[in-house]
Amino acid sequence: MAHANPTTRATARTPTLLQVEGLCVTYAQEHGRHTAVQNLSFDIAHGEAFGLVGESGSGKSSAAMAILRYLPRHARTSGSLLFEGSDLSTLSRKQLRALRGERIAAVYQHAGAALNPGLTIGQQIVETLRTHRPMSRPEARERAASLLAQVRLSNPRAVLDRYPHELSGGMQQRATIAMAIGLEPALLILDEPTTALDASVRTEIVAILDALRREHRTGLLLISHDIDLIQRTTDRMGVMRNGLLVEQGKTGTVTTRPAHAYTRGLIASLPRGHVTKHTGRLATSDDRPDVAVDPDPPRDATRQPPRTALRCTGISHTYGTHSVLHNIHLEIEAGTTYGLIGESGSGKSTLAKIVTGLVKPTSGAIELFGETLDARVESRTTDDRRTLQMVFQSPDTTLNPRHRIHRILSNPLRRLARLPRVEAHRQIDALLRAVQLQAEHRSSMPGALSGGQRQRVAIARAFAGTPRLVVLDEPTSALDVSVQAAVLNLLNDLQRQRGTSYLLISHDLNVVRYMADQVGVLYRGHLVETGPAERVFQGPNHPYTRLLLTSAGCKDPAGSSLARRGCVFADRCPIADARCQQESPPARRDDAGHMIRCWRERAELEVLTPTIQEALEQCVAAATQRCHSRL
């Protein structure tokens, strides 16, 4: 159910803020025009949240860009767009500039593309504030720091002086959210605003959006493939497919009693409950859940222990005086999936870049199938690069915008897989089908594809060279749930057929629970818990792991990046004592290989779990109250 103020629900509608009637959007192409949005109609009242759900390429973002008047020149629109009674299509450029930011603000899916790489975060927020508000530069900077603290960026004054490339993807996304809410707009359009955010930060963002609605009657248009987020945030929702709105209604009704077969298929595609890759496949059809159990082959008790695919020993890394990773020891067995979880900025992506040779560690060594890897990818052999591939979080920065899709896929097929031209040509179509793209996409440029489609191309490219180990950094964050299900099924099929190993980094704990055999929990560059996935998710847990599992939103203290003498989580732990503050805890490991780095014994943690749970729930309430008071 949506966590909204009952006075803002559709049952007690206030005057209309935004009215969309019969919206159509078409794009000029080589062979005619492509219709992206067909006859779309919905409205949003003051203080109301409306969600749009649908597959990548269904027209959701085109609708948002049409409302903002940000469509490219080759786009054509028809229909009615009324904002506070004014026809948006009749406004001049000057009037639109005044409207954007002041009355309508937007948060885009790829924060890295929305931020100016040549300006610091502080310069960009201050410029936005001073453009629309009469305030001095020091006042604007103080307001900017407050906004960054509100979206739970630790040490916000230091973040003001950083450039976008110095922040993680999740930190960039929070900075763009801070910029959007700074002027308290009447309408906030959010296009996949939480894809790069971990569960605990997502909880606080939901609290911020709820506070905006309650205190300032801000209307929300939330575009997302995250159905859980839509459930928690919106009053009403619509489901789009191929440019058409196929279902619309109250969020609770649509998600619990969907009427359209397509909506039922989307909900059935979610990895939920205790289903894992060993117990069933995820549904991918429109109306028939595909949950046929594919049991694991019987294990031979006399066989040799599995070969280690990846071994990281003593990996540490420092950016200047900022320590990112601390003495990381990690092993991935061949043919298994290791899930790495932790908040944005905890060092997950840095570790992935170290493994793939894109970043050189300050200390430590990496072994790939028993052979020591050179720290730099430039010094690695072709066999090394073929064996180890990576799927990055943002495809916008990894796909060459000047190359067509067939060239992007043919390069690794010919250079790494060493296929002749004709065979490589055939394999391109097979790769596209595997990630649910059509054959006609092979002639497309990356810019002509949606964000989710570009991510599918990136996944196809990673597997073109038949790798044995793939690093997956948020591989499905830009994918809608049905395509996510197909990709997860594909990854598991390849693992069974080829013995492929995965290092999976994800903020989506449901995805990790479904995919992973082993799980590691990273906090401020420290592995605080590791073990078999079922043991980590069942508990007992390190208190930080419990925080992630309950999606609590405790405030990260300023200066959290600094080294400390005691437990790295002591400042946020509800059961920390004086010893936790002073001495680094031991790593306690049981017979099943489940490690928890904590001063408390395993049995004591199990007894204390209700106490920890209650404290974390109080943190959620406090976070919500904090958001209300700041707004």
Image: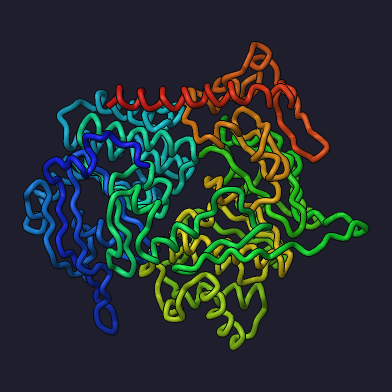
x then y, percent, for residue 505: 59, 49
Left or right: residue 374 compared with residue 437: right
Give the image quarter of residue 278: bottom right
Judge whether residue 558 can be spotted in this image: no
Q: Is residue 264 above or below residue 414?
A: above
Judge whether residue 54 can be spotted in this image: yes
Depth check: 322 or 267 in front?
267
- Name the outermost residue toward the top: 578
x then y, percent, for residue 194: 41, 45
Q: Residue at x 52, y 70 (%)?
A: 435
Query: Looking at the rendering, in which quadrant would you find the C terminus?
Result: top left
Depth check: 321 or 309 in front?
309
Q: Is residue 289 above or below residue 12?
A: below
Q: Residue at x 18, y 57 (%)?
A: 69
Left or right: residue 463 compared with residue 138: right
Q: Residue at x 30, y 59 (%)?
A: 61
